[in-house]
Image (cartoon, rainbow, N blue to C red):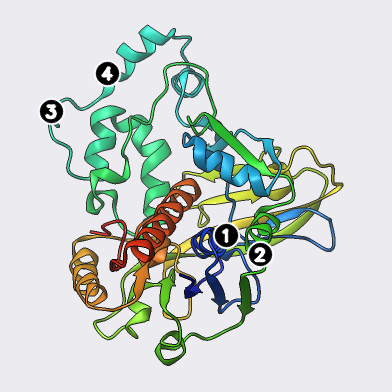
Amino acid sequence: MSTSCLMVGAGLSGAVIGRRLAEQGHKITVMDGRPHIGGNCHTERDTETGVLVHLYGPHIFHTDDEEVWAYVNRFATFRPYKNRVKTTTRGAVYSLPINLHTINQFFGQTLRPEEARRFIEAKADTTISDPQTFEEQALRFVGRDLYEAFFQGYTIKQWGCSPTELPASILKRLPVRFNYDDNYFFHRFQGMPEEGYTAMIARILDHPNITVHLEATVTRDRAAAFDHVFYSGPIDGWFDFRLGRLGYRTLDFERFSHKGDWQGCAVMNYGDVDVPWTRITEHKHFAPWESHDGSVLYREYSRACGPDDIPYYPIRQVAEKSLLAEYVALARAEENVTFTGRLGTYRYLDMDVTIREALDCAAAYLRAVGDGGAMPAFTVNPL
C-alpha cells in the first residue's frame, strides 16, 4: 500500500527516511524553511576562493556502523580524512585529544606510556569516588593542571556556565591517550564527502517519488493532508512552544578570509577563558585533496539560543529534561506524527547515529504499514 508522507526538514533525517520510503513506492514531500537542503550539514563553494565551506560549522563523518558507512558511500565519494585538532592555551599550541605528546610537552617530560599513566594517576584527585559534575569527572581522571588548561575555560565558553553545574556525562570517556595518536576520533570509518554534504543529500533526495519544497512553512492544517508526518524540527516548535521553550546553545560565526594558509590546521581550539571565541576553523583544510590560494575561516562564539536563533546543542539539564518530558507526553498523544533527529528528540546526535536512527525509523514505518499497526511518536526514547 502506497502512502503519502511529509518530511518536515531536509536534513539527514528527512532525506534518509524519505529516500527509503520512496524506494518502497511511498509518495514523499519534503519541506524545509531554509533556502537550501542539508540542514546544519549544508556545504557550499565560496565564490571568492573556491573553498568548500561548512556554513554551520564543520561536520566530519566517523562511524563504526558498516551499514551506515555503506549507505553514505552509495551517494557520495568519501575521501580519507583524520580530524587532528589543535588547541591554544597559556601561550602554547598542543594537540587534542590529550595524548602522550600533549602530556610530555605540557609538563616538560619525556615519559613513556607506562610512566605517563602513573604520572597522570598521581595527579588525579582520587578522593572523588563517584564524579557527579563535569569538573569532578575531569579532576578525577586527569587532575587539576590538565583540567584547567584544556577543559575549564573552553567548557565555560561553550556552555555559558561553570563546569561544576554540568553533569559528568558530558565528559563521557577518559580524555587521555597514553600514546602519540592524535586522531580525534576512534572509529573505523572516517572521511569527508568529496563534493560536500549538500551534494550527498541532494543525491539521496533525487528520486521520482520525492518532491522538495524549500522556504516552506509547515502548519498543522497543511500536515494533516498527509497520511503520516516525520518531524525533525524542534519538538517544542510542533506544539507552538505552548509549555515554554527548551534550552539550547547556539553559535555565532565571524567569517574572515586570508591569502594563503592562516593557521595550518582545520580546527584550532582556544582554551583560555579570556579569548572570547571557542575555536577557529579553516575550511580548506577539511578538503586536503584540494588546492586553494585563498582561505576562508570562521571564529566560533557560543551563547544562549534565542527564539530567532538556530538551535545547536540541547542543554538537557534538570529543568530542560522536565519540560522535555511534558512535550514527549504531548507528542505521544499525537496521531500520525513521528518525531525524529536531533531537534525532534532533543538530543545531541552525530551524523552516523542520525542516519542509523533514520534507517531504523523508516524500517519501523514500513513494518507498520505492512501489518496495519500504528507508528509510534518516537522510535528512540528521547528521555
- Amino acid identity at mark 1: Glu
Q: Quadrant of the N terminus?
A: bottom left
Marks 1 and 4, the one that precedes in the sequence: 1
Marks 3 and 2, the one that precedes in the sequence: 3
Marks 2 and 1, the one that precedes in the sequence: 1
Q: Tell me residue 380's x, y (percent).
A: 30, 56
Left or right: where 299 falls relative to 307: right
Left or right: where 307 falls relative to 299: left
Q: Nearer the viewer, mark 1 or mark 3?
A: 1
Disc 4 crowd, CA 10 A, few/some/many (<14, 14-19, 20+): some
The reply to whether the C-beta atoms of the residues labelled 2 and 1 are less than 8 Å apart is yes
- Disc 1/disc 4 C-alpha distance (Å): 54 Å
Q: Tell me residue 127's x, y (percent).
A: 13, 28
The label number, if any, that marks residue 23 in the structure image: 1
Residue 267's image quarter?
Answer: top right
The reply to whether the C-beta atoms of the residues labelled 2 and 4 are less than 8 Å apart is no
- Disc 4/disc 3 C-alpha distance (Å): 12 Å
Q: How many marks?
A: 4
Q: Which residue is mark 2?
A: 207
Q: Residue at the location (27% across, 28% down)?
A: 141
- Amino acid identity at mark 2: His
The label number, if any, that marks residue 127 in the structure image: 3
